[in-house]
Image (cartoon, helix red, strand yellow):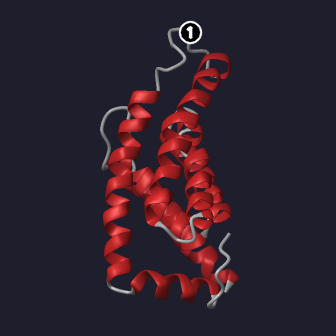
Amino acid sequence: MRLKRLVVLSMFVAIGVVISPILRVEGMCPTAHLVNIVCAVFLGPVYALVGALLTGIIRMTLMGIPPLAITGAIFGALLSGLAYRLSRGKIIFAVLGEIVGTGIIGALVSYPVMTYIWGRTDLTVFIYVPMFLGATLIGGSVAFLFLKALQRGKLLSKIQSGLWGGKNEKG
């Protein structure tokens, strides 16, 4: 089972890396949030966090993306998985976790990272909040529709059961 989860995680990372430069709006990467939420629901908070971190590192290394690839993903991925778990499987809470984690926390954490580590001195504290919130709302909406469709077709529980062997605890 663990190997199966690692393979699925690596697929999420690959999708996140490949699709992010294709389906993006300047300054926003809604597909990253779609991938984070679906990964969090399928695999849980720890795997979602690791997936977001690996995706961000690969994007930074290969594509020259600034640290926003990490700060704009890890908090949302983790909170998405935690909110989904704590709500006992309510998809809307996974989406809200991503929105709060990335749209607010990730955006605010990005300011000192970009200012003090990356050397950008022309920024304000809330500079990333509108972009991050916009991206999470778009990606979160698509993730919600996708996961709800899987749930209506009774596929979501089958996927989760296939990854966790019938266990309820994820991550």
Residue 109 shows in this picture: yes
Q: Quadrant of residue 2?
A: bottom right
Task: Return the x and y of residue 61 as percentages of the image width and height.
Answer: 58, 43
Task: Return the x and y of residue 127 as percentages of the image width and height.
Answer: 46, 20
Looking at this view, is 32 or 127 the one in front?
127
Residue 160 vs 24, above or below: the answer is below
Q: What residue sits right under mark 1 in the picture?
A: 121
Looking at this view, is 81 or 89 the one in front?
89
Q: Residue at x 55, y 17 (%)?
A: 125
Task: Return the x and y of residue 152 as percentages of the image width and height.
Answer: 33, 81
Q: Quadrant of residue 114?
A: top right
Q: Is residue 100 left or right of residue 144?
A: right
Q: Mark 1: few, some, or many residues within 10 Å (few <14, many ≥20)?
A: few
Residue 34 vs 30, above or below: the answer is below
- Total marks drawn? 1
Q: Residue at x 47, y 45 (%)?
A: 99
Q: Amino acid at mark 1?
A: Thr
